[in-house]
Image: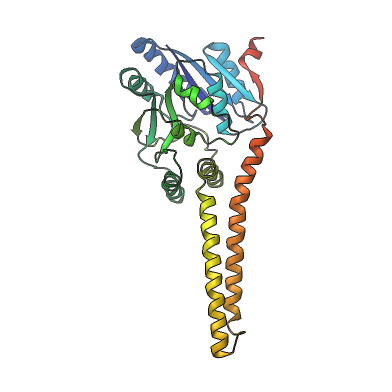
Amino acid sequence: MLLSIIVPCYNEQESLPLFYKEITRVASEMKQSHGAEFEFIFVDDGSKDSTLAIARELHRQDKRVRYISFSRNFGKEAGILAGLQAAKGDYVAMMDADLQDPPALLPQMLDALLHEDYDCAATRRTTRQGEPPIRSFFARMFYKLINKMSDADIVDGARDYRLMRRRMVDAILSMPEYNRFSKGIFGWVGFKTKWLEYVNVERVAGETKWNFWKLFLYSLEGIIGFSTAPLAIASLMGMFFCLLAFVMIIVIIVRTLLFGDPTSGWPSMVCIIFLCSGVQLFCMGVLGQYLAKTYLETKHRPVYITRETEEDLDG
């Protein structure tokens, strides 16, 4: 029984040695308790620090360690995909290198797959301690919004940290889309998932790579990738303002016939023009986002480009 542990890394030189120490400790315990073998796949997402050098050294010391280094920074979604494609295990787990995803949960996750009728054991945070309040608020609103707008089941507080059977991994890999949103893909493919809850854990070292703007763009990626509701909303807004304009024309004609002063109220008319123009631009922006994603898909560019792997180091 082989477990593949996928760890996307970007500038994690401080966290990586601490993570390796903890995951190897858990792996040693699980080998005794479950008879499990491990491989550790570190995906270097174009790091600018010593992350790649540390991954090389870990591979020299421990042949269970594998690594993939990108030619530049392609993003965490590309790192997840690269790890899934490289994984050889019967069971595949993903977790962050900053130890916010506790490796100590792995035995419990594996038990859920071995002894219960589940295809995946996933984790979610019960609290958001340590996050700015405004970020937590928008995160909760995002989960509520996307679950109402799409068919994908995305649990509030869900982490990318999960352990999956090989059949679920193969189902995910059968979706070759360029614009990827893993949380939505996990929910869309289905399979029975057991959710494990834990209290939020602070980073063991280093700084988060996710600021508010990056999270906002990531949420847009998820909404556009798994829902056409924004297009329907744009259409409904267009219909509403067409109806409103028709009513206003009737009102102006009647007022002119009764009071004979068609030019009064021009400031309100200017405000209405600005409002309608803003709505039009908003709807064009929604259409533009879907068109842009379609454009990127039709190019068939690779999601990532590999610069180096452990095979190159071994020669």
Q: Position of residue 126 (x, y in %)?
A: 35, 39
Q: Position of residue 207 (x, y in %)?
A: 53, 37
Q: Position of residue 170 (x, y in %)?
A: 50, 22
Which residue is at the far bottom? 259
- Residue at the image position 48 percent from the left and 15 percent from the top: 89
73 w.r.t. 119: above or below: below
Q: Foreground residue, 240 or 35?
A: 240
Query: In the rendered image, which quarter contains the C terminus?
Result: top right
Side of 72 relative to 238 (left or right): right
Query: In the rendered image, which quarter contains the N terminus?
Result: top left
The reply to whether residue 256 is visible in this rendering is yes
Q: Foreground residue, 111 or 130?
A: 111
Q: Position of residue 214 (x, y in %)?
A: 56, 43
- Residue at the image position 49 percent from the left and 25 percent from the top: 171
8 w.r.t. 89: above or below: below
Quadrant housing residue 81: top right
The reply to whether residue 13 is visible in this rendering is no
What's the colour scheme? rainbow
Side of 277 relative to 139 (left or right): right
Q: Foreground residue, 56 or 180?
A: 180
Q: Foreground residue, 45 or 28?
A: 45
- Residue at the image position 56 percent from the left and 33 percent from the top: 76
Q: How many marks?
A: 0
- Residue at the image position 50 percent from the left and 18 percent from the top: 40
